[in-house]
């Protein structure tokens, strides 16, 4: 059976800690690649000023372009700085970007924020370990394992122990909410495809297409 439950823990890094982790992972991990990613993070009815208002929403819909490869991603389940959700990714030809955006708009998904990240991805002691820059100013880590439903707790415990060894702290619930709210406050990254077109995205983020 396919492993389709994502156990993921995220946290904040300083620039200094980012550079330290990069050295450690280059030495002790296996480098899997660099991801230049544009993410369109969708909201169903409005882009909330405070994501606490959306805590009951279980569907996390995204359109992502990573190294000029397009995919639609749905994660399902309760979310936070540490979460376990079912995830489905569908690869789509990049030249179908306009069709995908218009398809989602017709289904009622027309509001999103755009987020750019540069990710360095490693395999490190059984995890996919990512360190990333967000909009070139903020630094995060992600530790992720794909697993079966019955193994979720075991893998979460393993990630927690690994982070303790590395002296890394996951986001608290409040820190994660604060981070999401800061990103949502970036009005220049808001898009409404009832008023804008896919071409507006392509013009603003030319390097990703």
Image (cartoon, rainbow, N blue to C red):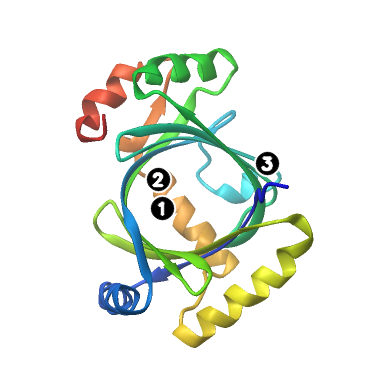
Residue found 24% across the figure and 32% down from its top: 205
Q: Position of residue 131 (x, y in %)?
A: 36, 64
Q: Quadrant of the C terminus?
A: top left
* Local secondary structure at mark 2: loop
Above or below residue 65? Residue 119 is: below
Tell me the crowding category of disc 3: few under 14, some 14 to 19, or many 20 or more residues within 10 angstroms, Cα based. Answer: some
Residue marked by disc 1: 182
Q: Nearer the viewer, mark 3 or mark 2?
A: 3
Is residue 170 shown above or below 71? below
- In primary-sequence order, the first of circles 3 and 2 is 3
As measured in the structure, the alpha-carbon distance from the residue carrying label 3 to the one carrying label 2 is 19 Å
Identify whether 180 is placed above or below 153. above
Please give the name of the residue rendered at 48% of the width and 52% of the height, measured from the top-left corner: 180
Answer whether labels 1 and 2 touch (C-beta < 8 Å): yes
Label disc, if present, on residue 185 of the rendered structure: 2
Sequence order check, earlier mark of 3 and 1: 3
Tell me if 146 is positioned left or right of 34 in this view: right
Numbered tag placed on residue 57 in the rendering: 3
Q: Secondary structure at mark 3?
A: loop
Which residue is outermost to the right? 150
Q: Tell me the residue at 25%/74% (across/down).
A: 19
Q: Is residue 204 visible?
A: yes
Which of these two is toward me, 131 or 80? 131
Report the side of 111 relative to 119 (left or right): right
Give the spatial CA distance, label 3 vs label 1. Answer: 19 Å
Relative to residue 168, is residue 61 drawn left or right? right
Per the model, the C-alpha gap separating discs 1 and 2 is: 5 Å
Above/below status of 82 relative to 187: below
Residue 35 spot, x, y in % from top left:
32, 49
Looking at the image, which is closer to me, 46 or 137?
137
Q: Is residue 195 left or right of residue 74?
A: left
């Amino acid at each position: 059976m396919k492993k389709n439950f994502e156990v993921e823990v995220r946290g904040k890094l300083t620039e200094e800690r980012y550079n330290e982790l990069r050295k450690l992972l280059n030495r002790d991990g296996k480098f899997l690649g660099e991801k230049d990613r544009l993410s369109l993070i969708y909201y169903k009815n409005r882009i909330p000023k405070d994501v606490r208002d959306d805590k009951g929403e279980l569907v996390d819909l995204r359109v992502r372009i990573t190294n000029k490869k397009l995919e639609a991603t749905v994660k399902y389940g309760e979310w936070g700085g540490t979460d376990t959700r079912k995830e489905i990714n569908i690869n789509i030809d990049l030249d179908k970007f306009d069709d995908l955006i218009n398809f989602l708009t017709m289904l009622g998904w027309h509001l999103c924020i755009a987020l750019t990240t540069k990710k360095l991805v490693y395999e490190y002691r059984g995890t996919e370990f990512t360190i990333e820059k967000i909009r070139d100013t903020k630094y995060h880590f992600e530790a992720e394992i794909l697993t079966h439903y019955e193994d979720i707790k075991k893998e979460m415990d393993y990630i927690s122990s690994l982070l303790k060894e590395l002296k890394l702290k996951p986001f608290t619930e409040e820190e994660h909410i604060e981070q999401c709210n800061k990103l949502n406050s970036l009005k220049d990254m808001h898009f409404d495809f009832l008023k804008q077109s896919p071409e507006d995205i392509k013009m603003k983020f030319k390097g990703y297409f």
